[in-house]
């Protein structure tokens, strides 16, 4: 059974990965920003990692795999965000190499691309370039569906629950590939067990228009919503103006650009490598929002 170090273990995906690895009987160590506040499974060793400057390298000693799931999305300044995320990934990778860790798994995103419209996608792509495809693994999940999840899906879900009005930017025509959080954890576990390297996309094979997924979500939630088509250009200009003035806005320009950049990616070959069937969106939503009664 491998000894695995998980960064961002107190976060959404990192927490799910931690619990999945423990359930497999693996020895799990957690690197988190605030060890005194981290809620991790019993018997998980905890150390501090406040990237890029602080890494408890004692947790890396004797580990076979590092799964890097930590990634700040709240920092609005691109240079500070890159220092924490891209430079932080580089320093963590160097520390892992010094400690003799055999494999490094970086949790990226299907949005990662050097020409992505949002900084998130470009910075994920920059971090991917630090890895050695012959020995490391880049795991790119689609839009993750789970109870309590965040990101674009979480933002829209919260709008449905609170104001019951959902904007369809660009008419909601963008292709969306979802993936249940349990499938992400299973894919990561199988990739580690099989020694897979390179890049793997993990999502349902068939993309649906974003608007269709949102309507399916509202139906599963039992919520009546008004879906309002809005153009990207004017909305992006308005949100950026509010950000420059320091005015509160329910939507960041980064989120808008992320929706604009949604794209479909091939997954069939990668799922075959994992021998994994990714849940289709209707099944994922049924598990995220189970029927009442």
Image: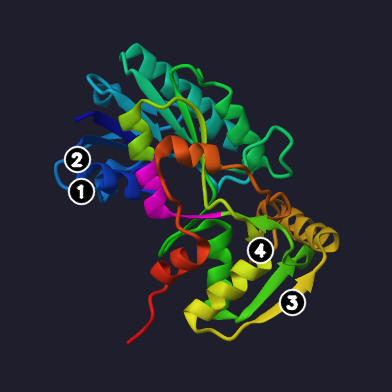
- Label 2 or label 3, whichever lies nearer to me, is 3
Task: Specify whether 137 is left or right of 1.
Answer: right
Q: Are marks 3 and 1 in contact (CB under 8 Å)?
A: no
Task: Specify whether 187 is left or right of 44.
Answer: right
Label 3: which secondary element: strand
Decide which of tag 3 and tag 1 comes sooner along the chain: 1
What residue is drawn where x is 80% and y is 63%? Answer: 235
Is 119 in front, or is 179?
179
Neighbor class of circle 3 (other Cα within 10 Å; few <14, some 14-19, many 20+) is few
Q: Main secondary structure of the magenta part?
A: helix
Residue 196 sits in which quadrant?
A: top left
Task: Specify whether 99 is left or right of 220.
Answer: left
Residue at the disc numbered 2: 44
What residue is drawn where x is 41% and y is 54%? Answer: 181
Q: Are marks 3 and 4 in contact (CB under 8 Å)?
A: no
What residue is drawn where x is 65% and y is 55%? Answer: 255
Decide which of tag 3 and tag 4 comes sooner along the chain: 4
State the separation of the CA atoms marked 2 and 4: 38 Å
- The disc placed on residue 228 is 3
**Whole-percent x, y for residue 62 in the image:** 22, 19
Region in magenta: 178-187
Residue at the disc numbered 1: 41
State the separation of the CA atoms marked 3 and 1: 42 Å
Is residue 5 shown above or below 227? Answer: above
Label 4: which secondary element: helix
Q: Quadrant of the C terminus?
A: bottom left
Neighbor class of circle 2 (other Cα within 10 Å; few <14, some 14-19, many 20+) is some
Decide which of tag 1 and tag 4 comes sooner along the chain: 1
Q: Are marks 1 and 2 in contact (CB under 8 Å)?
A: yes
């Amino acid at each position: 059974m491998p000894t695995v170090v998980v960064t961002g273990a107190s976060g959404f995906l990192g927490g799910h990965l931690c619990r999945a690895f423990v359930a497999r009987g693996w020895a799990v160590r957690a690197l988190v920003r605030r060890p005194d506040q981290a809620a991790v499974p019993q018997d998980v060793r905890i150390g501090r990692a406040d990237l890029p400057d602080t890494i408890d390298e004692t947790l890396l000693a004797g580990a076979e795999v590092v799964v890097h799931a930590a990634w700040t999305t709240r920092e609005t300044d691109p240079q500070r965000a890159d220092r924490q995320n891209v430079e932080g990934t580089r320093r963590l990778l160097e520390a892992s190499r010094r400690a003799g860790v055999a494999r490094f798994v970086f949790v990226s995103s299907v949005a990662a691309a050097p020409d992505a419209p949002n900084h998130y996608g470009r910075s994920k792509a920059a971090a991917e370039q630090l890895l050695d495809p012959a020995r490391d693994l880049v795991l790119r999940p689609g839009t993750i569906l789970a109870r309590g999840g965040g990101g674009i899906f979480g933002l829209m879900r919260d709008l449905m629950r609170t104001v019951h009005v959902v904007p369809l930017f660009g008419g909601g025509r963008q292709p969306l590939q979802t993936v249940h959080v349990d499938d992400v954890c299973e894919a990561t576990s199988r990739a580690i067990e099989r020694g897979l390297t390179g890049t793997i996309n993990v999502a349902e094979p068939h993309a649906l228009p974003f608007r269709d997924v949102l309507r399916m979500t509202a139906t599963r939630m039992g919520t009546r919503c008004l879906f309002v088509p809005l153009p990207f250009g004017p909305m992006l200009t308005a949100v950026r103006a509010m950000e420059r003035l320091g005015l509160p806005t329910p939507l960041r320009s980064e989120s808008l650009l992320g929706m604009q950049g949604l794209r479909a990616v091939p997954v069939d070959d990668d799922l075959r490598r994992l021998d994994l069937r990714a849940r289709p969106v209707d099944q994922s939503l049924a598990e995220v929002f189970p029927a009442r009664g």
